[in-house]
Image (tube, grey):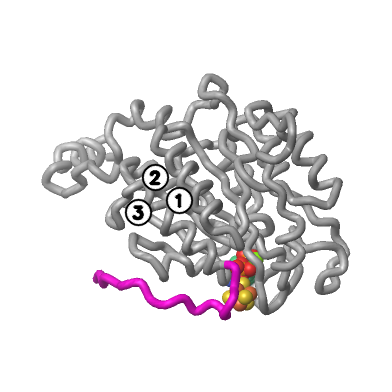
Amino acid sequence: MTETLKPVAPIWCPGCGDFGVLAAVKRALKDLNVPPEETVLIGGIGCSGSIHNFMDGYGFHSLHGRLLPTAVGVKLANPKLTVLAIGGDGDGYAIGMGHFVHTLKKNADITYIVMNNETYGLTKGQASPTAPLGFSGNVETPFDATLLALSIPSAGYIARGFSGAPKEAGQLIAEALRFNQERHGFAFVEILSPCVTYNDTYKEWREQVQSVESVPGYDRTDRGKAFAGCLNLLSSGKIPTGLLYRPDDAHLAPALDGVLLPQVGRAPATVDISLEANRAGYEKLLSSLT
Ligand SMILES: Cc1ncc(C[n+]2csc(CCOP(=O)(O)OP(=O)(O)O)c2C)c(N)n1
Ligand code: SF4
Ligand SMILES: [Mg+2]
């Protein structure tokens, strides 16, 4: 049973940062002329994770914290598709943290966008792993996902945008998709996306965000220097934004699809799996089991 659904109007609270991310994703796909029938959006669980319902393309609402293995599977099954995994900070950095690290390591040609609002918006404002000390009774020190990503040797594209600057965020996403198109591997883009209902950080983030472009001597091609540059900004109360890390092509790790697919021969989604086409193979398999 199949049903074709049209995009519906967002159900987010008025003023939610997620509107800026939606605009940025749409702009990036338009800039790259990616048609809806070749776009797959894998949503997480959370306010952010419903983004695929609000735009054209194939959408899949994944399990909480499991959007990344789903997205990798879609990409490996049909590498022609442009695959974006989009979820929240709770989804990606709490329950989904294991998948986040391993997907950075796997390095498939997909783009992962985390809409970070430092809270669990959908479940009414609990502390997420990026929540500051004291927020909603939080007793844990927050961590920075871009620094974590920088610690994974295969990472090749790490960026941070702000939904209050959707044009720049759209450019970072477009560059991430281009990185995938060029078969360079996984692209990670965190977008600061305030939850105006439970954690309205617009004012402070507007003051805190600082593009690494404006930092004299910042070197995004060198992992150690990028880490130190970001850490310096964070230590001085700023939040580094822009393209934080992108080594030269010669220093990029091999992308998973580029390594695996030549071994398999054909993309699994394009293989004829009808009974008749495979009857001889099935019969051979059956007889080998008796
Ligand atoms: C396995 C599982 N555990 C817990 C939940 C409850 N739950 C739904 S959304 C959510 C957190 C959402 O936070 P985030 O990913 O940051 O998304 P946001 O709503 O902030 O955009 C949780 C814990 C769930 N749906 N499934
Ligand atoms: S609860 Fe927060 S994150 Fe969810 S839609 Fe409302 S403002 Fe956005
Ligand atoms: Mg959140």
| Amino acid type at mark 3 | Thr
Disc 1 residue crowd, few under 14, some 14–19, many 20+, Cα 10 Å: many
The residue drawn where x is 56% and y is 38% is 157
The residue drawn where x is 85% and y is 46% is 235
> Horizontal placement of 185 versus 6: left or right?
right
Write down the region rendered in magenta: 1-17
Disc 3 residue crowd, few under 14, some 14–19, many 20+, Cα 10 Å: some
Ligand 2 picture quarter: bottom right
| Amino acid type at mark 2 | Lys
Residue highlighted by disc 3:
39
Any part of residue 115 in sight: yes
Asked if the beta carbon under badge 1 is closer than 8 A to the nearest atom of ligand 1, the reply is: no
Residue lying furthest left: 276
Q: Which mark is residue 204?
A: none
Residue 140 sits in which quadrant?
A: bottom right
Q: Nearer the viewer, mark 1 or mark 3?
A: 3
Dot 3 and dot 2 residues touching (CB under 8 Å): no
> Horizontal placement of 178 versus 253: left or right?
left
Residue 193 sits in which quadrant?
A: bottom right
Residue highlighted by disc 2:
75
Residue highlighted by disc 1:
71
Q: Nearer the viewer, residue 207 or 35?
A: 207
Query: In 3D space, how far apart are the residues under numbered discs 1 and 3 (Cα atoms)?
Result: 12 Å
Any part of residue 91 in sight: no
Asked if the beta carbon under badge 2 is closer than 8 A to the nearest atom of ligand 1, the reply is: no
- Marks 3 and 2, the one that precedes in the sequence: 3
Disc 2 residue crowd, few under 14, some 14–19, many 20+, Cα 10 Å: many
> Horizontal placement of 87 versus 232: left or right?
left
Residue 147 vertical placement versus 28 (above, below)? above
Query: In 3D space, how far apart are the residues under numbered discs 3 and 2 (Cα atoms)?
Result: 11 Å
Q: Which secondary structure class fits the magenta region best?
A: loop
Q: Callout 2: helix, strand or loop?
A: helix
